[in-house]
Amino acid sequence: MSGSSRRVLITGVGPVSGFGIGIDALWDGLCSGATAIRPITAWNASGFSSTVAATIAPEQLDIRAIVPKSYRKATKVMARDIEIAVAAADSAVRSAGLMTRGTAEGATPTIPPARVGCQIGAGLIPADSDELSAAMQSCQTADGSFDCGEWGRTGMNNLTPLWLLKYLPNMLACHVTIIHDCQGPSNTITCAEASGGLSIGESMRVIRRGDADACLSGGAESKVNYMGLLRQTFAQRLAPVPTGGDGAAAVRPFDPSADGTVLGEGGGLLIVEDAESAKSRGVPAWAELRGFAATQCRCDDTVGIDLANAGDDIAAAVDGALQQAGVRADQVDAVVPMGSGIACVDAAEAHAVRQIFGSRAATLPLITVAPQVGIVGAGTSALAACVAARCLREQRLPARLSTGNSVKLGVDADARGAIAATLRHIVVTTTGLGGQSAAMVLGRIA
């Protein structure tokens, strides 16, 4: 079967967050009302206005224990973002009941490698500050200034061999495809927080046109580093949280008085698979990926930082996804927005919800996870898709934290505990820094 008639399912989910690796760790944390936001301890963040983040503890992510023994040498050239993607891929593959070269060396793969693609959203990975500063220090002159000529002559030679390979955004997909022997179409998308959702949409198209039977798809990033925190500080997107402050309480999605978000590290990869392929394997799907659309938002500041007036464009992405899915607005039972606590972005998302869902907007549940796992850059929308898939399977909505004024924006995002719910379709929508919006419709498997 080829073309748009191919149904596309989500057969595996592999989120990575401050709660740990895998969907169970994430789901348990979300439903219990816990938060993974904590003080940054890996380096001194006291000079920043925001000193907290949703970080992955060292014991939660041991990359050498995840990759095959034959691949452990390659971990030396894995930046944090790459490690997260590799861990997410391993979790997704196992969740889907797939056998690959990465899960069982020498075994026959479940799906022929040529029929497995890989599309991953990535961020702009900053160089490790310790590695770079050590090399730069060798180019310091007697008066303390930096000698550019000496850097060209000897300084860069003090960087480790293959240094650059740790920091190219496409290296996430590169390592994942090598480990799991994905020989089908591969791509990397770098559009900030929308990257993971855009990658999932690309995988959907790859499968529908018959170029693959399954794809590893999603996004991953760690912004918990000097450059990540600095960029978001300059963009005025972070909630001020001084040393000793409560980071979780600082993130208030859809509160008009909110003053920013908190960063995290993580994301998620999913197994997006043709329905006939999944049927032949006899595996239960988490959800059906029924529709996808993307738009570029109009940004008054031209660089996509102030998205306050982007509501119509976000709504256009949601409307496009619904139309492709053949799903009416009244058949949607929940929405997973970015819900960052960045006031201008939240206002635009609320506008879109009101525009699409009309009078239902005030009672349609929004699933907000930023107060618990932070905003994880390129992994944000993929992590949201993992949460939506689990909601559909469990027929349950996780807890919400830190908001009490969403009524002022005409939406339902106030704090409450986890609750049972009848869920047929969930919309996931994310708008990234720069204005790219991705929307997808996930449907329950009957």
Image (tube, rainbow, N blue to C red):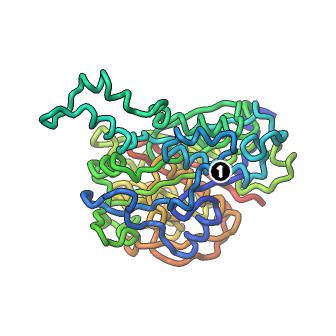
**Percent of width and height locating residue 100:** 76, 42
Please determine whether, in this image, residue 432 is positioned above or below residue 400: above
55 or 351: nearer the viewer: 55
The one nearer the camera, 386 or 354, is 386
Q: Residue at x 46, y 50 (%)?
A: 222
Q: Which element type, helix, strand or loop, lies under badge 1?
A: helix
> Which residue was labeled with disc 1?
66
**Quadrant location of residue 333?**
bottom right
21 to 116, vertically: above or below: below
- Neighbour tally class for label 1: few under 14, some 14-19, many 20 plus, Cα within 10 Å: some
Judging depth in this view, the residue of 203 and 353 nearest the camera is 203
Q: Residue at x 38, y 48 (%)?
A: 310
Which quarter of the figure has residue 188? top right
Left or right of 369, for residue 426: right
Q: Position of residue 180 (x, y in %)?
A: 70, 40
Please identify the quadrant where the N terminus is shown: top right
Q: Amino acid at mark 1?
A: Ile
The answer to whether residue 54 shows anywhere in this view is: yes
